[in-house]
Amino acid sequence: MADQHAEEPRGGSDAQDFAADPGGDAPSQAAGRKGSPPLALRLRRAHAALAPWVLAPLLVTVTTGLGYRLLRDWGGLGRDPAHGLMVVHEGEWLRQWFGPSGETLYVLVNGLGLLWMLGTGGAMLWQRWHRRGDRTKG
């Protein structure tokens, strides 16, 4: 009688399996899945990997933008004393390293990062709601 719990032969080596799933979070090969992890898992990993890099510039932008507006409106500061916050907020400080395009690159990367985080976060939220709805139906 053959052992029913014996592992089926796998295509490829363990090194290939690890390359396809370095974190080890994908469904196991024994479950019958081969190749790369599901799109949802790859999306979650990319979201988590980029989050710290996107969060820092967004926090700087939000903090300096709010600070500028509140100091101007409620703090009574004029345009010149509060201008330092705008230099940071708009990425003007990058001109010393990247020239005139530094400011534009900062705004572009900041905006694209925000769109990426909103898109991937929204997709993960939709998946969660979708799965929850499937469980309550059946």
Image: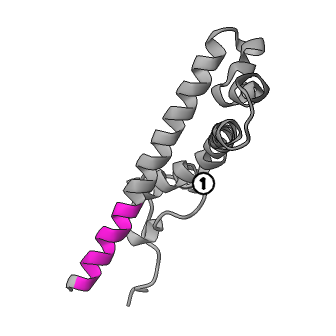
* The quarter of the displayed image where residue 89 is located: top right
* The quarter of the displayed image where residue 50 is located: top right
Magenta part of the chain: 125-136
Q: Which coloring applies here? A: one colour
For disc 1, the marked residue is: 22
Residue 132 highlighted magenta (yes or no): yes
Mark 1: few/some/many CA within 10 Å (<14, 14-19, 20+): few
Indicate the secondary structure of the residue bearing disc 1: loop
Residue 137 highlighted magenta (yes or no): no
For the N terminus, the quadrant is bottom left
The x, y position of residue 104, in whole percent, is 58, 18
Q: Which residue appears at 45% of the width and 61% of the height?
A: 10
Give the residue furthest to the left.
Answer: 137
Q: Which residue appears at 59% of the width and 21% of the height?
A: 105
| Residue placed most toward the observer, 127 or 66 | 66
Q: Is residue 8 above or below residue 55?
A: below
Q: Amino acid at mark 1?
A: Pro
The x, y position of residue 63, in whole percent, is 68, 43
For the C terminus, the quadrant is bottom left
Q: Which residue appears at 38% of the width and 68% of the height?
A: 128
126 sits to left or right of 116: left
